[in-house]
Image: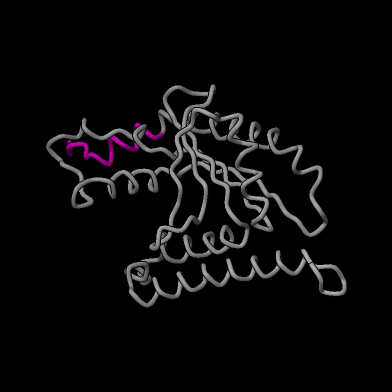
Amino acid sequence: MAERTVEDRLREQYFDLLPDIRRVAEELEAEVRFCLLPISLKLDRYERLVVSSRIKECESAVNALRRRQEGATFDREQPDLYVLTGLKDLAGVRVSVFPRKRCEETRLEIRRRFADWEPDPVLDENGHLLAHKYFGYCKASNKVRGEFQVLPMLTSLFWEVEHAAIYKPTPKLKGVAGHPKMKDRANQVAAALKAFEEEFEMLIGRDPLGET
């Protein structure tokens, strides 16, 4: 019989943890939606606040843990070193907000409920904030941590496309993520989306005569 690999062990771990992962995702989404009701009920017609949950798939979890190791490889001689519970985002909720001026209010509202969760902000190459992110434990499980993000909706939508096309590509697209020109283009898109929202927010702050 072939010896079980590190990946085999981790896949077994994943399916043992799956009920907890699902419970954490469900609880976190319900808690976040409840926290945000005061904001949701007062949104203007053009404003958006979208809450979505997801669980990390098995192979994605295994690959994520592998990337965190030295040389992005597992030590085959020490399989017991690796546990999926070390990941912070097996279950997560994303709150996408438009316009971005609502992000801080949204973050603070959720933060009141999850005050003991640890911050893990997403920054660009220049150290500028792209998204608020926090992780910690829910009542649903003491084994699996959850994560919530708050970010501008246009950035969120771009990340959905970028993640599918670049970070989970078909074999013929592998290597695209690390290409210098693609990195430059991605940074340009992020800057353009931010500029669009900033201009939009400035213009809606004016009266019909164009005066602030």
Q: Which residues are magenta?
A: 1-14
Q: Quadrant of residue 210?
A: bottom right
User: Is 45 on the left or on the right of 151, as rendered?
Assistant: right
Q: Nearer the viewer, residue 132 or 75?
A: 132
The residue that appears at 39% across and 48% down in the rendered structure is 60
Q: How is the image coloured?
A: one colour
Task: Find the residue positioned furthest to the right.
Answer: 208
Residue 37 position in % (x across, y down): 75, 37
The residue that appears at 17% across and 37% down in the rendered structure is 3
Q: Quadrant of residue 114?
A: top right
The residue that appears at 74% across and 42% down in the rendered structure is 39
User: Is 31 on the left or on the right of 91, as rendered?
Assistant: right
Residue 58 vs 174, above or below: the answer is above
Q: Nearer the viewer, residue 176 or 185?
A: 185
User: Is 22 on the left or on the right of 110, as rendered?
Assistant: left
Residue 87 vs 200, above or below: the answer is above
Q: Main secondary structure of the magenta part?
A: helix
Task: Find the residue positioned furthest to the front.
Answer: 211
Q: Nearer the viewer, residue 21 or 199?
A: 199
Residue 91 position in % (x across, y down): 50, 38
> Is residue 8 covered in magenta?
yes
> Is residue 83 covered in magenta?
no
Residue 98 position in % (x across, y down): 68, 57
Task: Find the residue positioned furthest to the bottom.
Answer: 181
Residue 111 position in % (x across, y down): 58, 35
The residue that appears at 66% across and 55% down in the rendered structure is 101
